[in-house]
Image: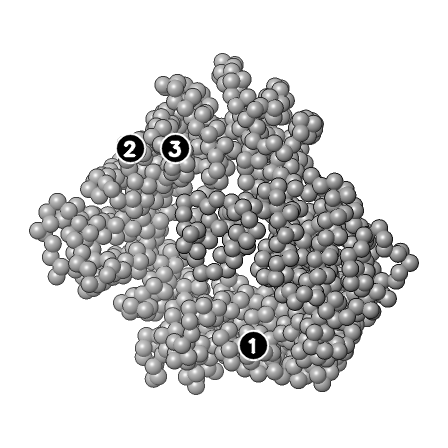
Amino acid sequence: MANFAMEQLPLPSTLPEVESFIRALYEPNAPGTISRVQDVLQRLQRSPQGWQLSQSLIASPDNNIKFFAALTIIVKLNRDSAGLTEDDAKELLQNIVGWVLQSLVDGSAAFVTKKLCSALVTYFIHFSHLWSGCFRHFLYCLEIGQSAPAASLDEGLQTSAIVERLDSCKLRAAVWFATSLVEEVGKTDMNSVKYMQVHESLIRNAPDITCLLARGFSPPQDNLGLKTQDETLSCFQAWILYAQRLSPGTNQHLITPLRELVDPAINCFADDSLFQETAELFSDVLSNYSSFFTESQYNSLASLFDSSWASEHYNRTVRGGQEGISFGLLMLAYGDAKVYDLMTRTDDRSRRFLEKLCGLLAADGYLVGEDSIFVPALEFWSTFVETMIDSTFSNDDHDTQLWKPIAEQYLKTVIMNCWRKVQWPPIEVFADWDSSERVAFSDARKDVADMLQSVFTLKGGSLVSFFADLFLQSLAVRSWAEVESSLSCLGALSDCISDSPEFDYELSRVFSSQFFELFAGEAQSPVPLQLRKTGLKLIERYCEYFERHAEYLPHALNLLFAAVSDPVLKDPSARAISTLCSSCRSILTGEAGAFIRHYQALRGSQVLDSLAEERIIQAIASIIQAITDEGQRLEMFDELYTFLKRDFERSVQLKAQPALLDLTDPNFQRGLDPLANPQAVPTVEDISLQIALRALRCLDRMAKGMQDVKEHVVDLDSEPQASSSSTREGAALLAIQSNIIALMAEVQRTFDRNGEVVEIICDVYRAGFSETEPGPFVFPADAVTAFFVQQSSDTPRLGALLSSACSFLGSLYRGPKMVVPNQLVRLLPWVISLLQALPDPESDTEVSQNGICFVDRMITRYPEVFFQLQPQQMLEFFFMFSLKVLNGKEPLPKSAAADFWTGFITLKSENPELQNTIANAMGHLGPLIAQTLIQNVGGNAARSELDKLSDPLKKLVTHQVRAQSWLQQALFDESFPSKQVTPEEKTLFLKKVVGLRGGRATNQIVREFWLACRGSNFTYVS
């Protein structure tokens, strides 16, 4: 195919040339060559000669060429069916049916016949009015072996008689057509006026379809018959799920005959070669359409599950492996469908079935890797528990006392099986698992934790006692996997019990045992690493318990700080330290100095992991925040902050004086990136940058730790009161704040091209925005504004800066009202200047989005500041910019622009002069807004954007008296993006939108109009 490797391929002029192009698709060629070949063939398919081409190609003996011919018919029907006369359409139908029949006798491959069946279905979708009895006519043509006109079909012929006379080959082709028919028609929108008749015609074919399926379920006579029976199951499944989508008033015409086929389908279980397909069918319908089966059919399935045949399959399932999972899934699907009946019935058959479902949680093999049924079985038992909860706490179930004791016995078995199953495998087994198996194992443990929380609602304290007992029993015999599983299950219950002292007795049994000695490494047997991790996490999860029982707090903290030095345990231990100190901060305030000294010792003895250090810093800061004496609080803060201040100074000095570098000094070793290639030699600049970044991250954590965790009542209408701090303490606070601001500014100047520096500095500022009380990171508004406005368009991470500026607005609005306008007057020109610096609104979507969001949040509260912006050209720029974004392709900025215009359209002011300015602006902008919205709903927007775009459209109609004329002008403008809708349809759309007056139904009208503008085939294709 070297002759195809050119810039542009001409259209072939002869049939052999066309065939050579088709064959080229199936030959090894470069991707570019194949792409160009496909382009040529698609142009041929779309050309007026496409119809004739398909007729010529279908006669080829080459299966690939015949397949392409069938595909061409589908393409032509979808594109050009409207150009066919009724006679042309009838002739085309006869031709396609004839080609299907010919493919059955000329040795064509099955994929050719299936594609021709798809072409028939496409014909039906476009011409259902000419072929309403499609299936009976197709069966008739199959029987007589030739293509007959649809009108020649004798209505007196019984479909069942026609089907009985079909041989295996023709029967199989009929099943293919029936399957393709329901699947392809099912893809169209049955609520659309365009396809309503298609679905009505399809439903009228239901009796003929069920005749075929009944024959398809008959005992096979040969291998081809066995394949047909397999494909009949798939066809039956497709028709059932289609029936589910129909409205209740319509689906009975289809459901009633389909239900008659359930018993023949159940009989297919008897054939081992059909078991997988039959199990999939019933599992699917039970899971997605359980109301399809009658009570009698449910009884038939229950009897099947209670048979010796089912026992054999069940035993295969619990022995593990993939071969038995289908039966397990079938049982679970039945259980889900009948969960309430199984829970409340006490008969022997129901009890035996539930016992088997309990057993699915104890199948052989390790979880996930060898046991695939555990997770689906766990999902069933989670549903069972939720159903128990609903029934137990509802007033409707008066027989609870009869069934609940029995159901609770099942839960005991379920919990014990789960406890065993989630135990960690031996390390050598776990090491052989791939990453997906490890993730799946972890996810399964989380699912068990979720179920245990639900069971707690029913069992309460007895569940806590159960796991405490298991822990102590396992600890006594040093069964580490069982100890870990017990602690993991106790940890899962922390959200349910940690706040309540009611369960402290059971927790004290755990923590007063050898718990702390065990993890400190003083136990007689070596403790597995995973168990140590779980123990540390348990401490973190029960912080409230330690707050109530401070006698255990020193043991916990000593254990955690000792584990920080372990490279594997550093993350869970540091996280637990942070959480525990934050929760117990008011208890630990007297130890703030000791914590700082402990941190100093850790820094001096080793290079701490960066994330672990950040969490320790946050932990100490949270303790400092709880100190009530402001002078002492600031003193402790400054002592901790001094470590970071020295790091900042060191990084700046090192950048300026590279000769200062001494990698034997732990303070400089902090600048070595642990994730970097160990073979690469870091530059002095890299080291200085890493020192600065590490100090900035710690400062950010310090800012988060200093946030007040107490809830304060905020009166939004009152002016904030001045701080009660003394002059000396106020001066000390301002000095600290000034030093922090100056150091961050110096670091940013030193590393002015690093975006991460900017982003972390923004995070530090943001930490103070949510605070209502003075603090080291609650910077003065002037200082924050100064930080923002000194940033230029060359500053990296401008999107993060603008996002932080948006957050700053919220902080301003909660502060003194007299301060706000002065800050906005400085911030607004800065924001718009950054937007002006963009080469295109979509060149940096984060900047566009956050810039528009800033103006949107500002204009609704302070419109006077916006309209007084100087120079005035900035206003005009922003309006045009946001309109351009609204007509763009980027979803996030576009959503922000839609919100801005929704608010702007409804903007009002009590100031007459300002209101007049707003009205004048709207008078100029209204036609442009209307045109932009119409461009979008006329086909330019993505489907997911329509609801958001409907908001400004609804506001325009309800708040602007000239909206109708603006929208009409936009609809009939030459720039309207679609040629698919008529002037009458545009007028009707406008009439509906205006008539709804901003009602919720406007969204649906917009979607329908957008679909019409996109083209007639869009719904079907999508």
Q: Which residue is at the front of the view, 255 or 153?
A: 153
Q: Which residue type carries mark 2? A: Ser
Q: Which residue is at the front of the view, 654 or 833?
A: 833
As drawn, 953 above or below 595: above
Question: Coloured how?
Answer: one colour
Left or right of 965 on screen, residue 536: left
As drawn, 714 above or below 223: above
Horizontal and vertical percent for residue 251?
79, 55
The quarter of the picture where residue 281 lies is: bottom right
Q: Which residue type carries mark 3? A: Asp
Left or right of 328 on screen, residue 91: right
Q: Is residue 648 visible?
A: yes
| Label 2: how many Cα within 10 Å (few below 14, some 14–19, many 20+) | few
Q: Secondary structure at mark 3?
A: loop
Q: Which residue is mark 1?
A: 322
Q: Which residue is located at x 71 percent, y 79 percent? A: 271
Q: Which residue is mark 3?
A: 840
Horizontal and vertical percent for residue 893?
46, 37
Q: Which residue is mark 2?
A: 792
Q: Are marks 3 and 1 in contact (CB under 8 Å)?
A: no
Q: Which residue is located at x 63 percent, y 34 percent? A: 980
Q: Which residue is located at x 58 percent, y 23 percent? A: 973
